[in-house]
Image (cartoon, rainbow, N blue to C red):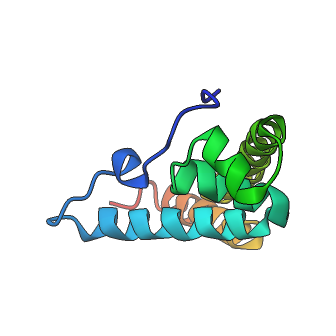
């Protein structure tokens, strides 16, 4: 679990590399995903998260800016990060399933073709060489 006071820099997660277009694309996709998930947060949590984690304002500064108690800033920031983690974890779980997704009917056709070729090779007394 990430420490509640940790600031995550996307460029630190995926360092910029001018020689690697795939890393630049991955970084842009990660940034877009984070922005989408941040936009999905309820406004009260999103505003606190942006002020604390993006603008790097202190708890006191955030509380003054929003005219809310410091305890509220702490709880909203903690809850915003929890909601973001849950949302990102769900997104990763969905992507993880797609990585090794079973091909269904296509896979069955491939297996049938391989078995047919093996059987045809056996009828000729060779392995197809």
Relative to residue 72, is residue 43 depicted above or below?
A: below
Q: Residue furthest left?
A: 19
Residue at image coords 78%, 67%: 40
- Nearer to the camera, 63 or 33: 63
Residue at image coords 82%, 66%: 43
Q: Is residue 116 visible?
A: no
Count of labels shown? 0
For the C terminus, the image quarter is bottom left
Residue at image coords 76%, 53%: 87
Residue 100: image x %, image y %? 63, 53
Q: Is residue 120 visible?
A: yes
- In this rendering, position of residue 17 left or right of residue 41: left
- Nearer to the camera, 28 or 101: 28
Relative to residue 82, is residue 92 depicted above or below?
A: below
Residue 56: image x %, image y %? 51, 49
Residue 111: image x %, image y %? 65, 62
Residue 24: image x %, image y %? 32, 67
Residue at image coords 40%, 61%: 128
For the N terminus, the image quarter is top right
- In this rendering, position of residue 7 left or right of residue 98: left
- Nearer to the camera, 15 or 82: 82
């Amino acid at each position: 679990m990430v420490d509640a006071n940790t600031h995550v820099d996307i460029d630190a997660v995926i360092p910029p590399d001018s020689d690697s277009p795939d890393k630049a694309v991955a970084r842009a996709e990660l940034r877009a995903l984070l922005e989408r998930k941040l936009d999905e947060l309820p406004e009260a949590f999103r505003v606190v998260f942006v002020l604390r984690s993006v603008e790097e304002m202190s708890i006191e500064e955030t509380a003054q800016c929003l005219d809310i108690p410091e305890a509220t800033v702490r709880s909203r920031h903690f809850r915003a990060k929890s909601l973001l983690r849950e949302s990102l974890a769900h997104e990763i779980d969905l992507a993880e399933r797609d990585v090794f997704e079973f091909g269904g009917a296509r896979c069955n056709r491939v297996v049938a073709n391989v078995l047919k070729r093996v059987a045809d090779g056996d009828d000729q007394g060779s392995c197809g060489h």
